[in-house]
Image (cartoon, rainbow, N blue to C red):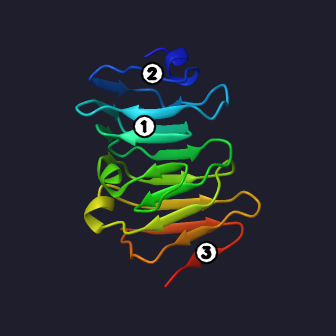
Amino acid sequence: IRDDLVTGVQTCALPILVILTHLETLFRADQDQTLEGVFSIASGKNIQTVDRALTIQTKDMEILGQIQLGLGDLTIESTQFGDIGLGDSSAQLNITGTELSRIQARNMSLGGDNSGDIFVSNVQAIQSNNISSELSLNATSEGKKVVFETAPSTFNKLSVNANEGIHIQA
């Protein structure tokens, strides 16, 4: 895949299997910052690295296929300070529990300096088990928080970084 197909487009049609061998690859689905870019993997399509890092920057995403990174790390960042929902939580960028189960990586980082609040609800162990080491939730922009909503969630190892704090709802 040419770099201009990966980093400079709103949508990108990928073949059935994309194998990435660069040290690190970036998919930016909102290059022109119109808030319209969506990263999507169709059913039966796969992105695979040879133990390499992958970063996805997007407004929203839909994972119907697989992301397989082996010992590689995955970073998913929301564009334009959009909120992130994980599991049954709803936000601008949603990753359902089913979508999370389709991701296989050593570490996964969700959020960052350009992301908004992160909301987490009802992530089952079977959905998060393919993250073999650590899942990091990063709401590090000024005034941003991580909220664990009422339904419990289970992770192998979790780290949470939040500028405005970690909120646990009962």
Cα separation between marks 2 and 3: 36 Å
Pointers 1 and 3 in contact (C-beta within 8 Å): no
Q: Nearer the viewer, mark 1 or mark 2?
A: 2
Q: Which mark is residue 91?
A: none
Which residue bears the numbered disc 2?
A: 12
Q: Please rate how many residues cluster around mark 3, counting C-alpha atoms within 10 Å: few if below 14, some from 14 to 19, many from 20.
A: some
Residue 83 occupies which quadrant of the picture? bottom right
Residue at 34% x, 47% y is 103
Residue at position x 64%, y 60% in the image: 139
Crowd band around label 1 with a 10 angstrom C-alpha radius: few (<14), some (14–19), many (20+): some
Precedes in sequence: disc 1 or disc 2: 2
Mark 2 belongs to which amino acid? Cys
The residue under label 3 is which amino acid type? Ile
Q: Of circles 1 and 3, which is in front? A: 3
Q: Identify the mark nearer the N-term, 2 or 3.
A: 2
Q: Which residue in the structure is indicated by mark 3?
A: 166
Task: Find out whether the residues at labels 1 and 2 contact each other: C-beta distance under 8 Å.
Answer: no
In the picture, the disc for residue 52 is 1
